[in-house]
Image (tube, rainbow, N blue to C red):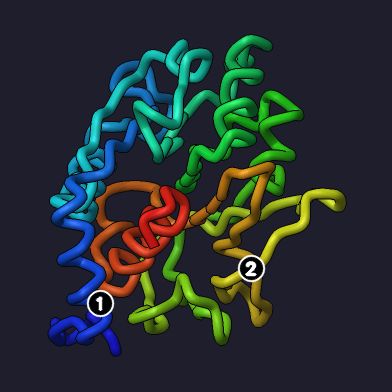
Amino acid sequence: MSETNGNAASVGERTANASNEQAGPVRALLLGDFTNAPWHPLEPARLELQAILAPEFELTATEDYAVMGRLSLEDYPLFISYADCWNRPVAPELTAGLLRYAAGGGGLLVIHNGISLQSSSELAQLAGARFTGHPPYQPLRYHPLANHPLLEGVEPFALDEEPYMFELDPIAARTEFLAFEFEGNRYPAGWERTYGLGKIVYLQPGHHAPSFKPASYRRLVRNCARWASGRS
């Protein structure tokens, strides 16, 4: 089933959605930079994520990085990083807080520049890779990789995006589920992994608001949020 044509949900999905509605929305905390963002201001992404995740998720956004030091699964089953902190170190106590949260069962969804938390080597390993640079912003085509549950309802899609490149961590096991085409080759654009009891997802698209417009990508973001938070 593809959401591209606005098809109705399957019976199984409708049943799951009804159960989720009865349980109430999942609280999700979004971290980014409203002010002083060097490349990726938070507000456009916040508006898109709010539209994508509501009403299943109750989204709170902050630019206070200190929240990482006091994250708790009880308060926020899902933490979304849209951090744009490429030139700022992450304090050790904040690194420890996010690692503790994930190990204890917290869900972490990292979108595009959210991987900038890699200034902490421990958080780079948590994410599963390190950003190494990108060629110029350009049209890209994205391909779901076969037989992964996060890809339910997700079709290939195209958008203009920054083709982020990565050095994949050789120790952090991950499962790739999305790739993009660039100069005749395919490169990782989405993967998932576990850390202790926690579930981690990275999604490469997200440079600005138009990145979130393709229906298949919106569906993928929802699927990943559900999985990471334990909703599905």
Q: Position of residue 59 (x, y in %)?
A: 23, 37
Tell me what residue is drawn at x 29 percent, y 58 percent: 212
In the rendered view, does 150 fall on the left or right side of 223?
right
Which residue is pictured at 44% across the width and 25% down the height? 38
Mark nearer the viewer, 1 or 2: 1
Measuring 47% from the left and 46% from the top, which residue is drawn there? 109
Q: Who is closer to the viewer here, 120 or 131?
A: 120
Give x and y (percent) for residue 138: 45, 63
Give the x, y percent position of residue 150: 46, 70
As helix, strand or loop, the secondary structure at mark 2 comes to strand
Labelled pair 1, 2 in contact (Cβ < 8 Å) = no
Q: Residue at x 68, y 11 (%)?
A: 92
Q: Is residue 196 above or below residue 121?
A: below
Give residue 210's quadrant in the image.
bottom left
Above or below, comparing residue 168 to residue 11 in the picture: above
- Quadrant for the C terminus, please: bottom left
- Circle count: 2
The residue under label 2 is 176
Q: Which mark is residue 225?
A: none
What kind of residue is marked 1? Answer: Glu
Label at residue 13? 1
Residue 150, placed above or below residue 60 = below
- Which quarter of the figure has residue 15? bottom left
Residue density around tag 1, few if under 14, some if 14–19, many if 20 or more, within 10 Å: few
Marks 1 and 2 sit apart, C-alpha to C-alpha, by 24 Å
Residue 122: image location, x then y, percent:
74, 29
- Left/right placement of residue 110 relative to residue 99 reads left
Q: Is residue 160 visible?
A: no
Q: Amino acid at mark 2?
A: Glu
